[in-house]
Image (cartoon, grey):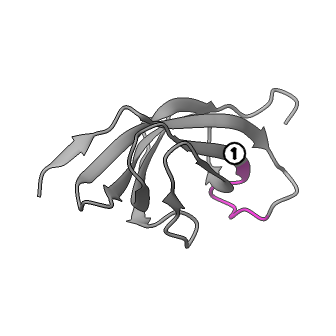
Amino acid sequence: MEIEELISLEVIVDDVIYMPSLEAPVDKPYPFVYFITIKNNSPERIKIIGRKWIITSYDGEKLIVEGDGVIGQFPLIESGDEFNYNSYHVISGDSQVQGSFFGETDLGRAVYTKIPDFELTIPKWV
């Protein structure tokens, strides 16, 4: 099945916050919460069926996270509507994040949209 980039499906990274109060493993002690909005500016209803995140630390370590849905859900976004959620990543050092969401229209067309790249920068006071 061919997957088509749907530029009218818009992803906005609303905020990225360092959250030291969250649990994190010893090897990745820096937790960040991010807030995402997925806007459907297309004329079709879209179901988000998967995602792929690539987190690359500045020392070259790469983590790929992919799976079904978004935070355990398969949001169905009507034309003109949006879906908001938050999630988190834990890192070992400053990192860059990129990725994509994958969806399907009511007519069964497979689509994707890119997530704007963003940074996970550990505050200097840490």
Depth check: 54 or 52 in front?
52
Q: Is residue 107 above or below residue 120?
A: below
Q: Is residue 99 above or below residue 8?
A: below
Residue 9 rendering spot, x and y as whole percentages = 43, 39
Q: Is residue 111 left or right of residue 15?
A: left
Query: Circle 1 sits in a helix, a strand or a loop, which is it?
Result: strand
Residue that appears at 42% across and 61% down:
47
Residue 30 colored in magenta in the image: yes
Q: Quadrant of the N terminus?
A: bottom left
Q: Is residue 40 above or below residue 64?
A: above
Residue 28 rendering spot, x and y as whole percentages = 64, 55
Residue 5 rendering spot, x and y as whole percentages = 27, 38
Q: Quadrant of residue 65?
A: bottom left
Q: Which residue is mark 1?
A: 35
The magenta-colored residue range is 23-32
Q: Quadrant of the C terminus?
A: top right
Depth check: 68 or 76 in front?
76
* Residue 58 can be seen in this image: no
Q: Is residue 124 left or right of residue 56?
A: right
Residue 4 colored in magenta in the image: no
Q: Quadrant of residue 80?
A: top right
